[in-house]
Amino acid sequence: MAQQAGRRYMRAFVSGFFVAVPVTVTALDRLAYVARVEGASMQPSLNPEGGSDCDVVLLNRWSVRNYEVQRGDVVSVMSPKNPQQKIIKRVIGLEGDFIRTLGYKNRFVRVPDGHFWLEGDHHGHSLDSNSFGPVSVGLLHGRASHIIWPPNRWQRIAASLPPNRGPLDDEEEEG
């Protein structure tokens, strides 16, 4: 009797496992997952204290399934320099925008179709589009929607552009 109960329990566990794992993997792949943000490139927005304290963010995969982002969004992309690494940066310009760069080989860049311009909030400490140029939207991995750790920093991450960043106005392009 005890053996039958043990077998039933084991069978239920195994069948539940084989259902739960694919559902969990699909949810993480399609909906959202959490990621630890390391480094100083997004200070003061993320990791404002620096040091060993790292923010943990919720990356919304569902909202970027059609590669639709807006200026000011904080996004996760596969690094154009190292495909094994994901980086988190702010969208400064979208395709067709003219951008005044901060140290890129050209002072002004038109963002090509199918690309966007990404920058870290801490310009002196960020490996971003000013280093490697416009980033293909195909490398987009998710949009950071909330800081979920540490608890004292729980908050929604709103899209916002830093002062004096973003696409150039028509008057600036002409002058």
Image (cartoon, rainbow, N blue to C red):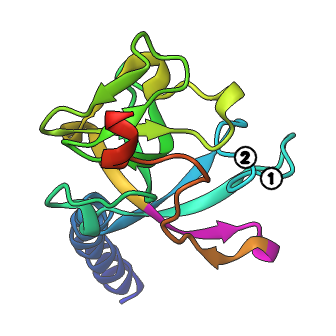
Secondary structure mostly seen in magenta is strand
- Residue at position x 55%, y 25% in the image: 102
Q: Position of residue 128 (x, y in %)?
A: 49, 28
Can residue 93 be seen here? The reply is no
- Residue at position x 48%, y 37% in the image: 87
Taking the image as shown, residue 32 lies to the left or right of residue 18, namely right
Work out whether residue 118 or residue 50 is closer to the camera in this orientation and state it: 118
Up-down relation of residue 28 to residue 162 (above or below)? below
Do the residues under discs 1 and 2 have CB atoms within 8 angstroms? yes
- Looking at the rendering, the stretch of residues picked out in magenta corresponds to 144-152
Q: Residues within 10 Å of mark 2 (few under 14, many from 20)?
A: some
Q: What residue sits right under mark 1 in the picture?
A: 48
- The quadrant in which the N terminus is found is bottom left
Mark 1, secondary structure of its residue: loop
Q: What residue sits right under mark 2 in the picture?
A: 43
Q: Quadrant of residue 110?
A: top left
Work out whether residue 133 or residue 37 is closer to the camera in this orientation and state it: 133
Q: Position of residue 81 (x, y in %)?
A: 39, 16
Which numbered disc flags the more N-terminal residue, 1 or 2? 2
- Amino acid carrying label 1: it is Pro
